[in-house]
Each structure stands twice: as structure tokens, then as C-alpha cells.
């Protein structure tokens, strides 16, 4: 009888205690920036620009015009500890600036490098970021969270254009978890 009660207590502890523990730890240590109030303003202050993605040149040792890379970011305490981040960095000759598309938890990136090469696309950028002289260099490119082709970017019957929901997710993850607390406070005063 005693072993049965201990077993039930352990089971209840695992079912209730572990999720409660994870919630408390996430709330205290992984809550990120308080971006909820500024996300709508950030999105409303964004504009679409037409740019041509440069040609991917495998012989460019500096990888200066177009690069693709995978990374990760800390969002919440979960089973793998982080989220996936896909970066597409490119130089726009139209705007004489570097841009970086940051795609958070985006699953359709496998053929993106084959599809974007020399394409005319619309990118969505925040006007404050675009006009900020700290952004636009190779080391600190202007953030992009949405792009779409002049015609849909299709590869193997998969549309690679960023949807509105994916755009909002990208902005939310960037402002909440990716942007440093110091930069967030400077920019939004919170």
C-alpha cells in the first residue's frame, strides 16, 4: 500500500510538478524582452522594397554578395533548448546596403539558396532600421523578416514566400528573444 501511494505521488509530481517547474523557469529566466506592446508598431512602420538578390558565386571567397547559413537562438526552455534560425545575407546594389533575412523556425529552407539566386523580390523592412546608419554594413545588415517574389517563389511545388503569420512570428522572435536587452531598451525605452 505504501509503495502504491509513493508511485501515485511520483506520477502526480511528474504530471503536474514538471510542467509547473518548466513554466516557472521559463517565466523567470527565458522571458526575453517585453516586446508584445511594440510588435504592432514595428510591423506598421515597415515597408516593402523591391530588390534583386545577387547571383550566388561559388568562387567568391569573401562570400560578400549572397550567403546562407543556419544558426539557433534561445527562446524558451524546451526539450532541445533552442529554436532554429536561417539567415540569408545579401547585398542590394539598389540601396547600397547589406540585408539579412532572419527566418525563425522556418522549415522550407532546404532549397531556398537554389530559388533566390538572381531573383527580383519584395522585402519587408522596418523604416527605422532602414534609415539607421548603424544598419546596412556587412557586419550589421538591415533585418528582413518577410520576402516574396514578383511571382511566387516556388520550388518542387512548395511556395517559399513568407506568409503574414510567418512574418509576425519572425518579428516576434527577433524582438523578444534575439535582440539584446540593451538594444531593445535603447530602441523602445523598455
Image (tube, rainbow, N blue to C red):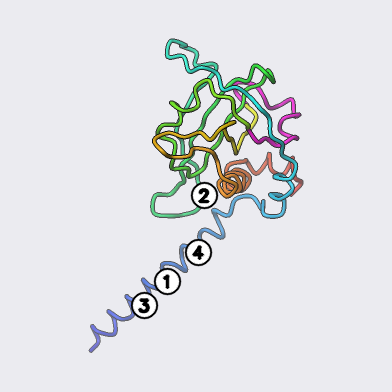
| Tag 1 near tag 3, CB within 8 Å | yes
Residue at x-position 53% and y-position 20%? 118
Residue 119 occupies which quadrant of the picture? top right
- Which badge, 4 or 2, comes first in the chain's sequence? 4
Taking depth in this image into account, of 188 and 106 the one nearest to the observer is: 106
What percent of the width, then of the height, locates residue 172?
A: 61, 48
Query: Along the polypeptide, which appears first: circle 4 or circle 3?
Result: 3
Q: Considering only order in the chain, which callout, 4 or 1, is on the residue closer to the N terminus?
A: 1
| Residue for badge 4 | 23
Q: Specify the label residue 75 is tagged with.
A: 2
User: Does residue 187 appear to the left or right of 173 in the view shown?
Assistant: right
Q: Which residues are magenta?
A: 123-140
Q: Which residue is mark 1?
A: 17
Q: Indicate which disc, 3 or 2, sits on the residue closer to the N terminus.
A: 3
Mark 2 secondary-structure assignment:
loop
**Numbered label attached to residue 12:** 3
Residue 90: say if magenta.
no
Label 1 vs label 2: CA separation? Answer: 22 Å
Q: CA distance from mark 3 to mark 2?
A: 28 Å
Q: In the rendered structure, which disc, 1 or 2, sits on the residue that comes first in sequence? A: 1
> Is 89 in front, or is 146?
146
Snapshot quadrant of residue 156: top left
**At x 59% / y 44%, what residue is drawn?**
167
Report helix, strand or loop for mark 4.
helix
Amino acid at each position: 500500500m505504501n509503495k502504491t501511494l509513493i508511485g501515485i505521488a511520483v506520477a502526480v509530481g511528474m504530471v503536474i510538478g514538471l510542467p509547473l517547474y518548466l513554466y516557472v523557469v521559463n517565466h523567470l529566466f527565458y522571458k526575453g524582452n517585453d516586446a508584445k506592446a511594440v510588435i504592432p508598431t514595428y510591423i506598421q512602420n515597415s515597408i516593402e522594397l523591391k530588390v534583386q538578390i545577387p547571383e550566388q558565386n561559388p568562387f567568391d571567397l569573401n562570400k560578400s554578395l549572397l550567403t546562407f547559413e543556419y544558426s539557433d537562438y534561445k527562446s524558451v526552455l524546451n526539450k532541445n533548448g533552442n529554436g532554429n534560425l536561417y539567415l540569408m545575407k545579401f547585398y542590394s546594389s539598389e540601396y547600397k546596403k547589406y540585408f539579412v533575412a532572419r527566418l525563425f523556425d522556418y522549415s522550407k529552407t532546404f532549397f531556398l539558396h537554389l530559388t533566390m539566386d538572381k531573383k527580383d523580390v519584395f522585402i519587408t523592412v522596418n523604416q527605422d532600421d532602414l534609415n539607421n546608419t548603424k544598419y546596412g554594413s556587412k557586419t550589421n545588415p538591415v533585418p528582413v523578416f518577410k520576402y516574396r517574389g514578383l511571382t511566387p517563389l516556388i520550388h518542387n511545388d512548395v511556395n517559399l514566400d513568407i506568409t503574414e503569420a510567418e512574418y509576425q512570428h519572425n518579428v516576434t522572435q527577433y524582438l523578444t528573444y534575439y535582440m539584446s536587452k540593451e538594444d531593445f531598451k535603447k530602441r523602445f525605452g523598455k
